[in-house]
Image: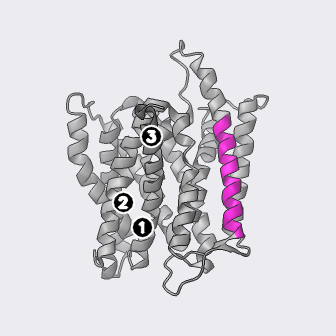
Amino acid sequence: MKMSGVVPFIAMIVQQLAQVGLAVVAKVAMSTGMTSFTYTFYSSAFSTLLLIPLSFFLHRSAIPPLWPTFLYGFFLLGIMGFLMQVLGFLGLQYSSPLLSTAILQLVPGFTFILAVILRMETFEYKSLSTMAKTIGTLVSIIGAFVATLYKGPQVFGISPLNTILTTPSAWAIGGLLTMICSLIASFFIISQAFVLKKYPAELILMLFYSCCVTILCAVFSLIVERDLNSWSLSPHSRLMAIIYSGLFGNVFQVSIGAWCVRKKGPLFVVMFHPLGIVVAMAASIFMGEIIHVGSLVGSIIIVIGFYSVIWGQSKEWKKKEKNLGSNNKKMPFLQDKIDDDPEVNI
């Protein structure tokens, strides 16, 4: 295999490592007293500062006009992104990187359900691909409930005195919050698809998105946060986590994901997503979390459902590739997810 063929594989592995790293550093920062509001504010603000020069540099020759309707769309995405990130980080605070990473694999299934409801996808009950996506979605949801509600005996890990990942009494709350986050992420993907069809400038959209999330987090933090310590960037681990989150959360993952889609296609990209569960499990064990049967079995069930959804979607991608002559064909919903969905990753 030539080096040019190896690079996309390496890029996707690095992307998955970065995604799990986002969950781990956020967990570390919030374990020191930061809240989901203040952490999201700082990371989004840093992302905005990075995206200002980057977006205008890359789009300087052809920036589409900013009509008021586009700004409304950006603001709507900002509201959904605000809810998605705050609930996602709050769910992570109550659970662990492993549980959060596993449950986020529900996003393709939830997106399929919403796409059918909104008539973006046709539900052909006699179609094998539709049945695969339907069954895969149900299986993934069952796996998420297993991982959230069933603990079971210990499989891996020990319980150190200074562990930062163990909050068993709030495990179910964390899982349910992450499921809600996944559902909002699905709404976000579909809304983003509509906006990008009218305004095809991803980094400009991400700039306004990050700016909206920053403003909303600042407002809500000033209202609900009474502990000034949650705003402090000390200890050093908080600042490092924010820099990592701002850099890899928006800028890095959007660039790598879009590049790999152009090189290998959307199916290649989504096939790597469950790798994050394996990495998250290794990271959780390394940092002291006890892995129980419920988390392990639930994650496996989610992955099985995930691949069933992706298998069904791949069949439809191949079918639509044979009909490229029609300009009225709708874009597969997961295409939008892979091209322009960095914020799904908590």
Q: Nearer the viewer, residue 36 or 71?
A: 36
Q: Which residue corresponds to mark 3?
A: 192
Q: Which residue corresponds to mark 2?
A: 245
Farthest front residue?
1
* 325, above or below 319, in the image: above
Q: Which residues are magenta?
A: 293-311
Label 2 with label 1: CB-CB less than 8 Å: yes
User: Disc 1 on helix, strand or loop?
Assistant: helix
Sequence order check, earlier mark of 1 and 3: 1
Mark 3 to mark 2 CA distance (whole Å): 21 Å
Q: Which residue corresponds to mark 1?
A: 26
Label 1 with label 3: CB-CB less than 8 Å: no
Q: In x, y percent, where is residue 126? A: 79, 28
Image depth: mark 3 or mark 2 in front: 2
Tell me the amino acid under the disc marked 2. Answer: Ser
User: Disc 3 on helix, strand or loop?
Assistant: helix
Tell me the amino acid under the disc marked 1. Answer: Ala
Task: Please report the residue visible at 56 percent of the width from the left and 78 percent of the height from the top.
Answer: 166
Tell me the amino acid under the disc marked 3. Answer: Gln
